Image (tube, helix red, strand yellow):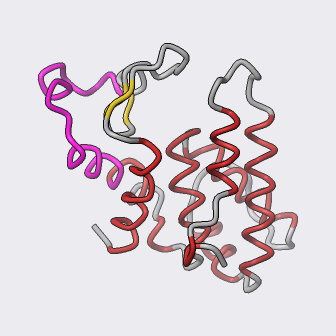
Amino acid sequence: MTPEFLKEFDILMQDEGAYSNNPKDPGGETKWGFSRRWNPDIPDAQWATWSREDSKQRAWDRYWSAYRLDEIKHRRIQHQLFNMGFLCGMKPIVMCLQKVLNKLGEFVTVDGIIGKETISAVNRYRNEMALDAAMESEIAQYLMGLPKKNAFINGWLSRNDRDWGENKA
C-alpha cells in the first residue's frame, strides 16, 4: 500500500466511520465504509469481526489498485476518483473523468475503465485547477441526476466539494 493510498483511506474513514445501520441507506448495515448488501461475498464469520484493517485491504484491492490510481499524477483527481468512486461506484466516476477530459480536449473513450488512454490523457493535462473544477462540476451533475429519494445526496455533494488542503490544486 502506498503513502497516497493510506492518506486517502484515512480521509475516507473520517466520513465513513466505524459502523452504521441507517434504514435510509440502500447499502444497509455498513462497517468501515463497506456495506453488507453490496458486499455479499464477505462470509458471515468474517463480517462479524470486520475491522478497519479489513476495509483498508479491500479498498486497496477493489478501488485503488484495481483502478490504477497510483498512476494518476494529479492528487486531487486521485482523491475524487477514490472518495466519490467509493460512494457511487468507480465506473460512473471514471466516466465523469473521461467526459471532463473530452471537454478539455483530451479525447478518450467514455467507458468507465481506467486504462492507458485515460491515464495518459489525465497526466498530460497540465492545468490541474481547471481539471479539478471541471471534475467537481461533472460529479455534482452526476449526483444531482441520482434519484431524489436518496437521503444522502446533500452530504455527498458536500463531500465532493470539500477542500482537503494539499489535495486541492
Name the spot of residue 20 as percent of width and height, x first: 38, 27
Name the spot of residue 123 as percent of width and height, x first: 63, 79
Q: Is residue 130 above or below residue 78?
A: below
- Corner quadrant of residue 117: bottom right
Residue pictured at 71% horizontal, 18% vertical: 149
Tell which of 97 and 141 is nearer to you. Answer: 141
Residue sitting farthest toward the bottom: 126
Residue pictured at 74% horizontal, 29% vertical: 146
Name the spot of residue 18 as percent of width and height, x first: 31, 38
Report the side of 28 relative to 115 (left or right): left
Residue 30 on the magenta segment: no
Residue pictured at 85% horizontal, 71% vertical: 104
Quadrant showing the C terminus: bottom right
Q: Is residue 49 above or below residue 85?
A: above
Name the spot of residue 118 as percent of width and height, x first: 64, 66
Report the side of 151 relative to 13 (left or right): right
Tell which of 76 and 13 is nearer to you. Answer: 13
Report the magenta stretch's main SS. Answer: helix
Question: What range is drawn magenta here?
Answer: 39-60
Q: How many marks?
A: 0
Residue pictured at 59% horizontal, 77% vertical: 74
Residue sitting farthest toward the top: 23
Q: Is residue 157 above or below residue 130?
A: above
Residue 55 on the magenta segment: yes
Report the side of 97 relative to 144 (left or right): left
Q: Is residue 54 above or below residue 68?
A: above
- Corner quadrant of residue 91: top right
Quadrant showing the N terminus: bottom left
